[in-house]
Image (cartoon, helix red, strand yellow):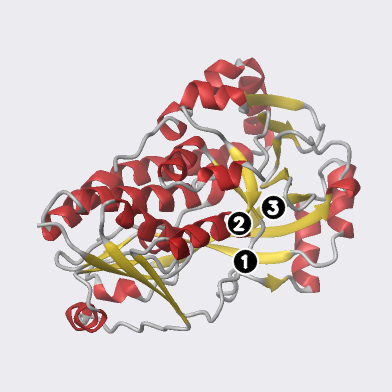
Amino acid sequence: MPIKHAAIIGAGVAGLTAALAMARHGISSAIFEQADALTEVGAGLQVSPNASYILGQLGVLDALSAVWLEPKEVRLVSGTSLRQLAAVPSGNFAKLRWGSPYGTLHRATLQKALLDAVLANPLCELHLGQRIDPVAGSSADISSRLGAELIIGADGVWSKARTMVPGSPSPHFSGNIAWRFAIPAADAPGVFDRTSVTAFLGPSAHLVCYPLKETGTFNIVAITAGGNAVHDWNATGSDSQRSILRQRFSGWNKTISALLDQVKHPTFWPLYEVGTGRWHNGADTVLIGDAAHAMMPFAAQGAAMAIEDAFELAGIVAGRPLTEALDVFERHRTPRIAHLRQRAAFNRFAYHARGPFRLGRDFVLSMRPPQSLAADLDWIYGYHAIG
């Protein structure tokens, strides 16, 4: 018999999507968020067609498409010569090939659209300033106290809900640092395409930039190797850390290295990932999104996987007894996550290639026609989640 009520820990993208997806099947939910107000850190976000398809099913896509940018293409460009190596068409092509649009927007825009939909839905409740501190083995007590048949851990890479899942995965530092910042579009160098997502590739680093239409800025993230750091998603890099950033890009084209020299307050994000392990406890608790499988951003699928998890969990739970549903969910989702991890690892190698490998990469990419590159993404972007 399907459940009637769920408790969701965390009001990020995963948690809010889970509440809407459950409501779509007539399942009520209460979201518990420890913050007193929802303020989304970070900056830009790419919403690929596999995620926008779900957002359309949940009724929030129209609010996003009214303000986001649908890039004309996703470009791969040499960070040293600024020569375009390859491009994947997007825009109308994405809608025709993958059945849903590809958009770029600020993370806060997505969160607000989801939040507005949650607040308008009578089956969803949001409780801010509510810290849930589980102790290992206490899921039954917590589910009873919250009046829920299912606890959904959507509380990110530093999940507390994981303590209720024996054998759950653990986070570890990836060895990579993301530097994030935004600049006014009017101040962006001419090599930044105003209509597309551009990934500049260089030795041991890469830089992604794209315009955010709703803020009039360019979102920029530079990813390099780096030392471990505190668990802070919004730290400003120290002078010594910024010196390392400049050093990593010192051999790049002067247009880009000069831009990094001028940035005053880049945000310093150590990138952590979550390894393999169990996602549920076989009874009443399940992990989704970064709590279950935080991964590197080299495939730009972190938020999309959280959205897919939430949507598919609801569909599976709505049609099966709970213990069976949790097992089906994990067995259904883990192969896709593993495949994406492999793709991200390959992209990291390709994006950060040095020496002869870099020359070989550039030659191979330059020989690939756009349609061939798009076909490589069909299994990611063309995926229509069950729900």
> Could you tell whether 368 is left or right of 386 in the image?
right
Secondary structure beneath label 1:
loop
Q: Position of residue 155 (x, y in %)?
A: 42, 69
**Lower position in the chain sequence, tag 1 or tag 2:** 1
Q: Name the residue under label 2.
A: 107
* Residue type, mark 1 in image: Val
Q: Which of marks 1 and 3 is in front?
A: 1
User: Marks 2 and 1: in contact by CB < 8 Å?
Assistant: yes
Q: Please give the name of the residue rendered at 20% of the width and 64% of the height, measured from the top-left corner.
A: 4
Residue placed under numbered mark 1 in the picture: 41
Q: Which amino acid does label 3 sit on?
A: Val
219 or 265, nearer to the observer = 219
What is the quadrant of the C terminus in the image?
top left
Inter-mark Cα distance, 1 to 3: 14 Å
* Distance (Cα) linking label 3 and label 2: 14 Å
Write down the residue under mark 3.
Answer: 221
Give the residue at x 57% y 36%.
102
| Residue 308, x across and y down, in percent | 38, 47
Q: Which type of secondary structure does the marked residue at label 2 adopt?
A: helix
The amino acid type of the residue labelled 2 equals: Arg
Residue at left 49%, top 46%? 301
Q: Nearer the viewer, mark 3 or mark 2?
A: 2
Q: Decide: few, some or many residues near mark 3? Use Cα within 10 Å; few <14, some 14-19, many ≥20.
A: many
Q: Do labels 1 and 3 touch, CB within 8 Å?
A: no
